[in-house]
Image (cartoon, coloured by chain):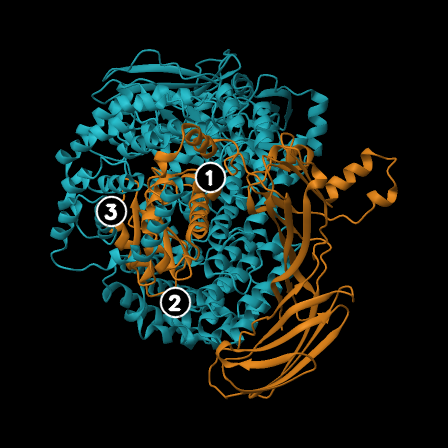
């Protein structure tokens, strides 16, 4: 198990050091600093073995978090824990920065004591932690016996992510379907790989312990229903459905029920959380197509022409469009002409950045540039990094649709239609690249 | 009032927000003294501030142990925050101040009685972290109470505390009976208590390999599976990791566990997913392949593995390292998912390198075009390591997918044209391998390669180029000039290049003796007289002597045809792979090393997989896991790196005379004779030329390896045994059984010597062993397991050693075997890897059983069937060889063979030769037919073997032993 946990600033100074196991000595702190933080070369692995001691690290801005062990620990668990640790800290004091960590070091030690016992991760849900790690030292005395046992049963219980007795005057929930569409396209326009990784983020402001049921246009579910009720009108079952390659759920979702019936049922945490993640690879709507044309004119000049075509309903508007065209390192000057938006050569980033505020569907736009090159005797050819794109569209490129989210709370007197529900779809570019 | 309090809290919080970071900046000199005063202040607030300062100093590594008594004095407080800070201090310094630490005991004991469960838990959590012997005794009572506390939060904390206490004083924990209490907690009603108890027990069990601590049986498994659905993500990981150690009784139980574990594949936590994959990969081994569920499971595994690739980069890295293992074990799972492993421009370098590895593993004829296009793209990237690996990958594709070889070679030539130094060098190294795989096919590119001779500055590339020049000397007009140019700076070259150069010039000389005499003289004298390197010198002398005594033999040896290199490269050795599969998700799977390679000390990692009860199914994996960890460190790579060559060369002297032990297997066909004797070494050698030279090394060391003698000796030896044994004709029962040989010498067995043999008695295969205790202490608790083997041999019952084995005592044991165990092809075919356990340790050895053990009693074929089958069998599946010096009549031979379940179907006499037609059946249902020609008065028998299946060669080889 985890033997110790250290937090360093960018200089390698220790901000937090908590040792859980006897086999981790004080020198472990220095070993990591010397061998990883101060190493001459770039880090080649997130796991480093120094003198039979293994270090796992993640970086958040310029803060290093390192977990140490001498055992054959579950490596995936250690990284998951480090991420979770970051989440918890962010939930308590915001951005993870040197200043915030120093300002809250007592709190961090308290948290570390709670969520890691002898190196075993314990309940690390912020919802539960915030009920008893408050940085208000004396609170313990003011708690009644019931309150205390409520805390402990929540921390250890089956529904560790939600406390009892939540009340809202207005029961409301927000569903955001956030998708990032990823593409790698060859210069000839052939899709080398494309996938959508999506998240369903829910903000719930619901009273009591509500039972929720979430439904989407999952092909498997819809096909099953189609078969089950043959009398259902064909139009309904033939409604567009999508094939989900794989999905993962927040721990509140009953996985065995999903496995057997493919229904998504849960008692949600209070506030914002990520209900599910999914991935699709079939029938993806690629919102933009990038057509590059790069021509080398002699040794000192490049001609670049890039056309982008939007590929969605004309009534919809894409926003925050940015096309990034890489330029060689020995670029001396660039002339750009674009039909729409603004384009600029950014020497520090070695790229031409073309920005368009808005663009409707089924439109086309073009940029052309002449790049002057300094002659070099560098034998190595320019690697021609891919042209990348950023954008935001108001639909889900995977085609996912939320069919329903039902809320049942038997003990309190509000029913499903008393709940105000909001659904929003946002498609963003993930790594959206076209080779040139 | 309430309001006032909360306002105060807010104020304080505000205050602390502003000021906490100041604790980090104190660098004054009289600091300790000041702190001491503050700690003893009457004001609570000041006290707390002081303790915070102490903790801050502690964090940055200052020694504040001198404040111990003052800090501990602050322990008696109602302020929970202050209490926690003091506890933190205590955990850090108690060990250095054991006497003072006693002062804290009272508070702990008192806190363990506190009405607030949070405080009780805090006390029990902290006191476990205080590693002072004197204190631990006082903690037993409070801990016992807390283990039975009414509050689950306290119980789950107490469960972990048992593990802490065990780490400090294992004996105490056992004596106090905490382990039993902990076991009871597995049935607790609270899922988190169960999870922590499982985690604690698993860890304790690791250091007690023999104990039956984690007594996993169907009931407990059921409890764990129930808790799995309810506990936190971390708890799920503990439980899944524990489940992975269980061995289901049969395939049905295995399936039902798999069914209950698969929902975990949709968990958001990657570690839960990977641990579930581990359980499934392990239990899947037990499922029959024709089961529908087996296929379903395979399909279910792919999507979650792909999803792991959209996690954060660090987790991607862990996932990719694991996928690398999974793909080697079960390539079918991800064979259609090639695209997800394409490298993204912004991936961290460690992710890129791993993806590349997996792409090669998944490359097949179906997707090779895409893969090559990608690889070519990568070869132009910036990172040198990545580019090198991409180039190397192109070569590996060529070797793996024959159809793509041509395209790969042309891609490599394109890359060489880029003249980027490291790309060129890497390309030349892989082209050499391509030459080895497809000899006489792509030599047209040699000219292009030679153009780049000057730019090569890395030893590996130089050595590869020299090898190519030497190997194809006859086609390169100026080979002598090229090699001569290298010779100029001979002493500045690395050993690798020197050795290669020596061999290449000798090859050149053998091919073009007239022009190159001077050159060879020169290199031999450089190697033998001017070099300090013994390897180089020895090889030089060997060549020299060989060339001077018998140039013809030299030619045969040095220019011998080289065996082809294998398709898959860089595979992890199968036994290690199996062990690593059991460690999916853990560090071992990230390092691709067994835990023993990086975990220190007594945590008996390698014993973990050997459950107490010997027997069924999955646990068969254990012997090899152990042997991979401890005994043999076989090089995993099929193409060994040049650095290994010397090692191989030295080892070779040991391999050929494998006459110890049971009758040696006649490898790959009798006709090859001498080649075989050297074969083992040759295969593993990279340069064929080196193969040649090492072959000579063997030749010199051993008696002259005349082909005929070398193979006939062991074979006829075995045959003689078969024919002479049994004294007389009528001996229907009992097949030939070789005499006992020592399998496990006492040296290796920590005093336990095992010698044994195999026999077939009354239709039952038996392993007969003599166990001798040559140690000073009594041995007990014997158990045995086999690794999976070619014919599925497995113990039919436990090893019966009822009485303890006292020093110097021997005991005869007979272990009945069956052939229903898991099957895996071994090399040699009749090799059996065995693990024997006793109270001292686990020992691994391997032995070879005579194939005749497997000849079953109903191996007599109908005449008609025999005739038809004999005709059907293609010539490819036939083998013929002779047995010399066998003075038996055909009838006597027939009778003897019948004793070994080789049945004579018909007999015919042609031209004074008796022809015996015989059949025998192996335990796995394969028939082997034989024709035995016996000429009266001639002691040489001729045997023709024929056999229906593709296994033919192996079987005939095996049968040849008799």
For marks 3 and 2, the one nearer the N-term is 3
Find residue B753 and report its image quarter.
top left
> In the image, which is nearer the foreground, mark 2 or mark 1?
1
Residue beneath label 3, please?
Answer: B45
Residue for point 72% across, 40% down: A417
Colour displayed for chain A in the image of the structure: orange
Alpha carbons under labels 3 and 1: distance apart? 28 Å
Q: Quadrant of the N terminus of chain A?
A: top left
* Residue B561 visible, this orientation: no
Residue at disc 2, secondary structure:
helix
Taking the image as shown, residue B693 lies to the left or right of residue B375, namely: left
Residue at disc 1, secondary structure:
helix
Category of crowding for the residue at label 1, using alpha-carbon neighbours closer than 10 angstroms: few (below 14), some (14–19), many (at least 20): many
Q: Which mark is residue B505?
A: 2
A339 versus A385 height, above or below: below
Q: Quadrant of the C terminus of chain A?
A: bottom right
Find residue A365 and report its image quarter.
bottom right
Residue at disc 3, secondary structure:
helix
Q: Name the chain letter of the residue that bears numbered label 1.
A: A
A299 versus A182 height, above or below: below
According to the colouring, which chain is cyan?
A: B
Q: Where in the figure is residue A128, as x and y percent of width and height?
A: 46, 39
* Residue A151 visible, this orientation: yes
Q: Which mark is residue A128?
A: 1
């Amino acid at each position: 198990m985890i033997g110790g946990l250290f937090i360093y600033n960018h200089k390698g100074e220790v901000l937090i050091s908590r040792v859980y196991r006897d086999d981790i000595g004080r020198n472990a702190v220095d070993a990591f600093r010397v061998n990883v933080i101060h190493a001459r070369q770039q880090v080649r692995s997130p796991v480093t073995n120094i003198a039979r001691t293994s270090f796992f690290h993640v970086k958040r801005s310029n803060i290093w978090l390192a977990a140490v062990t001498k055992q054959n620990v579950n490596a995936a668990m250690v990284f998951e824990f480090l991420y979770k640790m970051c989440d918890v800290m962010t939930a308590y004091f915001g951005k993870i920065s040197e200043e915030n960590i120093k300002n809250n070091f007592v709190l961090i030690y308290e948290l570390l004591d709670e969520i890691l016992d002898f190196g075993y991760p314990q309940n690390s849900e912020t919802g539960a932690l915030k009920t008893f790690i408050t940085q208000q030292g004396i609170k313990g005395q003011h708690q009644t016996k019931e309150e205390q046992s409520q805390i402990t049963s929540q921390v250890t219980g089956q529904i560790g992510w939600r406390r009892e007795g939540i009340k809202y005057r207005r029961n409301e929930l927000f569903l955001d379907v956030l998708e990032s569409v990823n593409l790698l396209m060859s210069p000839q326009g052939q899709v080398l790989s494309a996938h959508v990784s999506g998240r369903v983020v829910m903000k719930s402001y619901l009273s009591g312990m509500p039972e929720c049921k979430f439904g989407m246009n999952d092909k498997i579910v819809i096909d099953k229903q189609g078969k089950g009720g043959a009398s259902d009108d064909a139009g309904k079952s033939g409604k567009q459905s999508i094939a989900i390659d794989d999905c993962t759920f927040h721990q509140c979702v009953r996985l065995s029920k999903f496995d057997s019936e493919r229904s998504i049922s849960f008692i949600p945490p209070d506030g914002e959380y990520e209900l599910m993640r999914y991935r699709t690879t079939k029938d993806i709507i690629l919102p933009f197509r990038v057509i590059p044309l790069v021509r080398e004119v002699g040794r000192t000049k490049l001609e670049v022409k890039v056309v982008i075509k939007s590929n969605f309903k004309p009534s919809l508007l894409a926003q925050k469009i940015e096309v990034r065209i890489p330029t060689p390192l020995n670029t001396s000057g660039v002339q750009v002409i674009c039909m729409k938006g603004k384009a600029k050569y950014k020497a520090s980033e070695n790229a031409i950045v073309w920005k368009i505020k808005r663009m409707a569907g089924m439109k086309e736009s073009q940029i052309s540039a002449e790049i002057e090159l300094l002659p070099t005797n560098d034998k190595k050819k320019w690697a021609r990094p891919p042209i990348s794109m950023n954008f935001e569209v108001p639909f889900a490129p995977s085609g996912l649709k939320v069919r329903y989210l039902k809320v049942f709370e038997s003990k309190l007197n509000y029913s499903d239609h008393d709940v105000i529900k909001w659904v929003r779809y946002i498609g963003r570019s993930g790594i959206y690249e076209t080779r040139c | 009032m309430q309001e006032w309090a909360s306002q105060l809290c807010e104020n304080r919080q505000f205050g602390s927000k502003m000021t906490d970071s100041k604790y980090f900046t104190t660098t004054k000199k009289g600091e300790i003294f000041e702190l001491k005063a503050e700690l003893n202040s009457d004001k609570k607030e000041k006290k707390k501030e002081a303790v915070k300062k102490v903790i801050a100093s502690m964090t940055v590594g200052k020694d504040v142990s001198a404040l111990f008594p003052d800090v501990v004095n602050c322990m008696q407080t109602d302020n929970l925050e202050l209490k926690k800070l003091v506890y933190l201090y205590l955990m850090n310094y108690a060990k250095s101040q054991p006497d003072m630490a006693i002062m804290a005991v009272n508070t702990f004991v008192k806190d363990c009685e506190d009405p607030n469960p949070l405080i009780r838990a805090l006390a029990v959590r902290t006191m476990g972290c205080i590693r002072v012997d004197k204190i631990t005794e006082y903690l037993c009572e409070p801990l016992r109470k807390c283990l039975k506390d009414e509050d689950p939060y306290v119980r789950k904390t107490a469960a972990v505390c048992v593990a802490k206490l065990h780490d400090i004083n294992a004996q105490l924990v056992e004596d106090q009976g905490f382990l039993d209490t902990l076991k009871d907690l597995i049935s607790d009603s609270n899922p988190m208590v169960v999870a922590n108890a499982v985690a604690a027990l698993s860890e304790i069990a690791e250091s007690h390999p023999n104990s039956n601590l984690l007594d996993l049986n169907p009931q407990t498994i059921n409890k764990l599976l129930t808790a799995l659905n309810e506990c936190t993500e971390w708890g799920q990981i503990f439980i899944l990791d524990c489940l992975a150690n269980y061995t289901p009784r049969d395939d049905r139980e295995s399936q039902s566990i798999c069914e209950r574990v698969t929902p975990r594949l949709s968990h958001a936590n990657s570690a839960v997913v990977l641990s579930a994959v581990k359980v499934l990969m392990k239990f899947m081994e037990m499922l029959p392949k024709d089961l529908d569920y087996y296929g379903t499971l395979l399909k279910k595994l792919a999507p979650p593995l792909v999803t792991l690739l959209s996690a954060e980069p660090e987790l991607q890295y862990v996932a990719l390292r694991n996928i690398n293992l999974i793909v080697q074990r079960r390539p079918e799972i991800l064979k259609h998912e090639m695209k997800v492993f394409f490298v993204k421009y912004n991936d961290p370098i460690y992710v890129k390198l791993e993806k590349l590895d997996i792409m090669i593993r998944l490359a097949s004829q179906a997707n090779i075009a895409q893969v090559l296009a990608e690889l070519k793209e990568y070869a132009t990237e910036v990172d040198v390591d990545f580019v090198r690996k991409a180039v190397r990958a192109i070569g590996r594709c060529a070797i793996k997918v024959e159809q793509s070889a041509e395209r790969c070679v042309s891609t490599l030539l394109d890359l060489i044209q880029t003249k980027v130094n490291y790309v060129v060098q890497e390309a030349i190294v892989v082209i050499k391998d391509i030459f080895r795989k497809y000899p006489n096919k792509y030599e047209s590119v040699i000219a292009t390669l030679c153009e780049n001779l000057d730019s090569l500055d890395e030893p590996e590339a130089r050595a590869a180029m020299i090898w190519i020049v030497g190997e194809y000397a006859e086609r390169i007009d100026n080979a002598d000039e090229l090699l001569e140019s290298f010779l100029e700076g001979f002493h500045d070259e690395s050993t690798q290049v020197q050795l290669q150069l020596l061999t290449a010039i000798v090859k050149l000389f053998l091919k073009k003796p007239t022009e190159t005499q001077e050159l060879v003289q020169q290199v031999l004298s450089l190697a033998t007289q001017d070099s300090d390197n013994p390897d180089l010198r020895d090889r030089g002398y060997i060549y020299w002597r060989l060339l001077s005594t018998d140039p013809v033999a030299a030619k045969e040896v040095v220019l011998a045809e080289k065996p082809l290199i294998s398709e898959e490269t860089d595979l992890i050795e199968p036994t290690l792979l199996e062990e690593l599969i059991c460690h999916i998700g853990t560090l071992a799977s990230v390092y691709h090393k067994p835990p023993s390679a990086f975990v220190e000390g007594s945590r008996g990692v390698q014993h973990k997989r050997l459950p107490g009860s010997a027997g069924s199914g999955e646990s068969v994996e254990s012997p090899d896991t152990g042997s991979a960890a401890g005994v043999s460190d076989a090089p995993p790579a099929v193409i060994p790196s040049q650095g290994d060559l010397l090692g191989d060369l030295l080892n070779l002297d040991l391999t050929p005379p494998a006459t110890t032990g049971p009758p040696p297997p006649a490898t790959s066909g009798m006709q090859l004779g001498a080649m075989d004797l050297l074969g083992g070494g040759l295969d593993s050698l990279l340069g064929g030329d080196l193969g040649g030279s090492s072959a000579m090394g063997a030749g010199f060391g051993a008696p002259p390896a005349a082909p005929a003698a070398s193979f006939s000796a062991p074979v006829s030896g075995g045959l003689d045994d078969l024919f002479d044994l049994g004294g007389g004709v009528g001996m229907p029962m009992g097949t030939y059984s070789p005499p006992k040989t020592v399998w496990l010498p006492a040296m290796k067995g920590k005093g336990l010597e095992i010698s044994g043999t195999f026999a077939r008695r009354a239709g039952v295969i038996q392993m007969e062993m003599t166990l001798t205790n040559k140690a000073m202490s009594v041995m007990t608790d014997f158990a045995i397991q086999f690794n999976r083997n070619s014919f599925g041999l497995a113990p039919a019952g436990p090893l019966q050693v009822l009485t303890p084995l006292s020093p110097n005592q021997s005991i005869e044991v007979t272990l009945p075997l069956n052939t229903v165990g898991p099957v895996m092809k071994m090399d040699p075919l009749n090799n059996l890897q065995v693990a024997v356990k006793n109270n001292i340790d686990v020992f691994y050895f391997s032995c070879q059983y005579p194939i005749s053990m497997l000849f079953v009693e109903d191996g007599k074929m109908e005449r008609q069937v025999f005739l038809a089958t004999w005709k059907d069998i293609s010539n490819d599946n036939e083998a013929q060889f002779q047995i010399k010096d066998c003075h038996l009549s055909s009838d006597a031979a027939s009778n003897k063979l019948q004793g070994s379940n080789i049945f004579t179907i018909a007999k015919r006499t042609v031209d004074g030769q008796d022809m015996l037609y015989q059949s025998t059946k192996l335990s796995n249902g394969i028939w082997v037919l034989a024709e035995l020609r016996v000429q009266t008065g001639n002691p040489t028998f001729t045997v023709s073997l024929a056999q229906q299946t593709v296994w033919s060669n192996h079987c005939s080889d095996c049968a040849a032993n008799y």
